[in-house]
Image: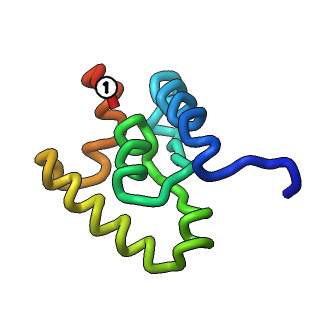
Amino acid sequence: MPGTLCGAPVREMIDVTVKFWYGRIDRTRHKIIGIGGISSAEDAYRKIRLGASLVQLYSALVFRGPGIVRQVNAGLARLLARDGLTHVAEAVGIANEAKAVV
């Protein structure tokens, strides 16, 4: 669609938006989807830690191909293990809960 922004240009704006809505929605009824500049496990993990229950890879999928999905999944598993977590759900919003800097 002409005139739209996606990918890395909206990364920081979406981070702020995810964090904002995480603290204001009924998370038993609604889930947040993290978008914008996700091209690595670290990018996905950041969105998850800010409050996204799901992440969307679009630009990375277009430019790097379907193998990026496997790379992000494997990287997420490593990041979760590093932080002593076993499920993505344990990391959702953890940056907000701990008042940590992400």
How far across and down, in percent of the image, does residue 66 sit? 50, 79
75 up-or-down from 17: above or below: below
Q: Secondary structure at mark 1?
A: loop
Residue at image x 85%, y 48%? 3
72 up-or-down from 99: above or below: below
Is residue 71 found left or right of 10 in the rendered image? left
Looking at this rendering, what residue extends furthest in the right direction?
Answer: 2
How far across and down, in percent of the image, does residue 32 sit? 52, 42
Is residue 39 found left or right of 82 in the rendered image? right
Image quarter (top left, top right, bottom left or bottom right) of the C terminus: top left
How far across and down, in percent of the image, does residue 26 sit? 49, 30
Residue at image x 38%, y 43%? 46
Residue at image x 54%, y 57%? 56
- Disc count in the image? 1
Towards the viewer: 40 or 55: 40
Image quarter (top left, top right, bottom left or bottom right) of the N terminus: bottom right
Q: How is the image coloured?
A: rainbow
Quarter-of-image position of residue 101? top left
Quarter-of-image position of residue 51? top left
Which amino acid, by three-letter code, is at mark 1?
Val
Is residue 9 found left or right of 67 in the rendered image? right
Q: Residues within 10 Å of mark 1 (few under 14, many from 20)?
A: few
- Badge 1 is on which residue? 101
How far across and down, in percent of the image, does residue 30 sit? 53, 40
